[in-house]
Amino acid sequence: MERRQRISARRVRPHQRTRLSKRSGALIVTALAACGGTAVIAAQALAGTGAGGTGAGGTDAGGAGDGTAVAGRTISCPDVGQRLRSLPAQAAPEVNRNLGQLEGQVARAFQRWAAGPGTQDRVLDELERERGATIGRITDALRRAGGQPGALDRLSACRTTGTPAAAQSAPRGARDGNSADNGPFRNDFVDITTVRPNTEGGGDRGGRGGRGGSFRSECGRNENGHNNPDNLIVAPGVSNGAHHLHDYVGNLATDAFSSDTELAAAGTTCGNGDRATYYWPVLRLRDNGRERDANAPGGGQDGNVGAIVRPAEVSLTFDGNAAEKVTAMPPFLRMLTGDAKALTNGPANANASWSCTGFEDRQLRNKYPICPRGSKVVRSLEFPSCWDGRNTDSANHRTHVAFPGRNGQCRSGFRPIPRLVQRLAYAIPPNTLYAVDSFPDQLHNPVTDHGDFINLMPRRLMRTAVDCVNSGRDCR
């Protein structure tokens, strides 16, 4: 029989955010991919006809799809941030600043193109010249610091593309793909009852982990309203670096300007003194409601509108590895799961999944579920659980960690660490239009869902979590 162990909770200290006054007041009408990433411009969405795919609800047989089923004409630029392979500390501020300039350049290109579609070629030429100069500054900063910029100078050119899509049944108010809108569209939704089961569990796709015991950190549902449009991992030091709003639980000091020292000294919403930072994009009802950020960066200025929905349930669970025992995560380990730009970057790093309570054997990656009455919408965010044993971050924020193989084993040179799964459940009324916050250029597509984590568990608590996982106990 499994034992359940409870560790006494620590009282949460009040939090006051003082850095919001530093936010820039510049009006950014459309958002851009973080780190100079790919941008998609919803100039005129193309209407789909018929039923696409081979499985239930127009997805593939597993209900996952390939992340491309969206209508729209796009401007597609290479994701410079994801191409970085090294980022020396002394070059980081200048590189991050110039990556932010790449974002602004795509914003201006969108505005010019939207105002005069007939100027498309000129807009692309001007954008390429601007990007070329900025990428050159990034390359110079890396070289001065001894980094290896690679072939970044080849990433300045952008192109326009168009992607067709098939329309499916959708909640009232969903666009049919015939307007210049930033989503969600009709083809982004599927009735969960029409999807065939495709997994034995909720969110453990492919059997990559989950063996042994577990440790659950109790951190609340963001009852204190800790939200901002920053991204401390991908865009440190950049206001509104995410261009969409995040929910935070755990560490109370997290924003774009937080240092490791500040995070380590901050209060937390978690029990047991867990100061880790857990965050994800907010979910909104697309109800034309006027939220408090209707005119703010990350909110209405970036195309994210409607009433924010607080999760009804938040589960933050660490479990084991299918092949061997796990080892402790290092302090300040940073991890991402999913890709906020997966609509245009492609599905390689897309990892979040969607389902409904009572139907979690049916996981969706590129569709929002329409849940029956009494069933909650569920987001599952599974994080990498293999670590290279050396680095707490990497230039593209991904290569220092990895997912296990199909056999559950970490590849050579990596060691297993506890696998974090963030499970979020929402009470969404049936047939109600909703969407995850996103870069507007990503059209609020569900494939762009993602989560972030910074480990600030005290070493003692991390040892307890590892012991619980490896000994087969379920603790909290």
Image: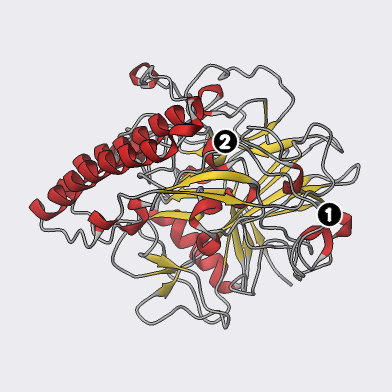
Task: Name the residue located 61 percent from the left edge and 44 percent from the top edge.
Answer: 72
Residue 247 visible (yes or no): no
Q: Quadrant of residue 377?
A: top right
Circle 1 — which element? Answer: helix
The location of residue 310, given as percent across then percent down, is 67, 32
User: Does 18 sit above or below residue 282?
Assistant: above
**What's under tag 1, amino acid-wise?**
Ile
Q: Nearer the viewer, mark 1 or mark 2?
A: 2
Q: Left of 379 or right of it: where is 328?
A: left
Q: Quadrant of residue 200?
A: bottom right
Q: Left of 27 or right of it: where is 396?
A: left
Cα distance, mark 1 to mark 2?
A: 30 Å
Q: Which coloring applies here?
A: secondary structure
Q: Which residue is mark 2?
A: 43
Earlier along the polypeptide chain: callout 1 or callout 2?
2
Q: Decide: few, some or many residues near mark 1? Use Cα within 10 Å; few <14, some 14-19, many ≥20.
A: many
User: Does 446 sit above or below residue 199?
Assistant: above
- 350 and 71: which is toward the camera: 71
Q: Which residue is mark 1?
A: 192
- 362 and 118: which is toward the camera: 118
State the count of labels: 2
Circle 2 — which element? Answer: loop
